[in-house]
Image (cartoon, helix red, strand yellow):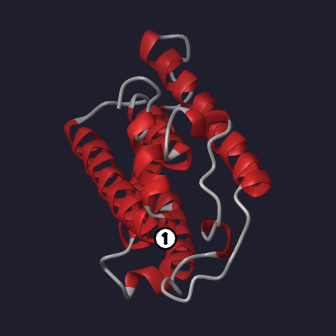
Amino acid sequence: MTRVILFFIASFFFLCFSRRSLGKPGTHGFYRFFVFEGILLLVLINHPYWFRDPFSPLHILSWLLLLASICFVVQSVLILKRRGGHADREDMPENHFFENTVNVVEDGLYRYIRHPMYSSLLLLAWGAFFKHITLFTAGLVFFVTGFLIAAARVEERENIRFFGSVYGEYMKRTKMFVPWLL
């Protein structure tokens, strides 16, 4: 029962955070909402298994992914804040303050991947999934992965419209989520 209550409380928070994007299905924030919900479900479903057999290979892999998730989000937020700049985008009123950068950031993780915050969510989802693998959680983690790819592609189209060819060139030099791979 506690997990159900936590699901509704967190979902309410995600709804409030995403309310402007949910009214515009073609925006990256629309897809991101479903990523948040999917990860929330993965965490809540697998929570009872997080500390069972903590030194098994899958749990060690899971902890490494969860740790990498934290490192990715912390580094990307700090770099984006320092190098991204800010401007209001009248063409994208559904964006949050931190999303409206004026510079293409190419330092730190951004040198290798275009979406380190989405990479963080991807690592979080897979880390939570490996805590207890079931058919349902496998479907859920692939759902989250698919919606992350959709959010990133939509955001890239938005960035090309805003930054122009500079962002297109940046895309050619970097991967979407995982350095040197994807």
Q: Residue at x 41, y 63 (%)?
A: 160
Q: Position of residue 7 (x, y in %)?
A: 48, 65
Vertical relation: 137 (above or below) 167: above
Q: Residue at x 31, y 43 (%)?
A: 141
Q: Residue at x 55, y 77 (%)?
A: 95
Q: Position of residue 24 (x, y in %)?
A: 36, 84
Residue at the spot of label 1: 162
Image quadrant of residue 155?
bottom left
Q: Position of residue 139 (x, y in %)?
A: 22, 44
Callout 1: SS: helix
Vertical relation: 63 (above or below) 77: above
The extreme right residue here reads: 82
Q: Nearer the viewer, residue 54 or 72?
A: 72
Q: Position of residue 164 (x, y in %)?
A: 45, 63
Whether residue 159 sits left or right of residue 144 in the image: it is right
Q: Nearer the viewer, residue 41 or 127?
A: 127
> Can residue 153 be seen at all in this image of the molecule?
yes
Whether residue 123 sits left or right of residue 142 in the image: it is right
The amino acid type, in three-letter code, at marker 1 is Phe
Q: Nearer the viewer, residue 49 or 176?
A: 176
- Name the quarter where the C terminus is drawn: top left
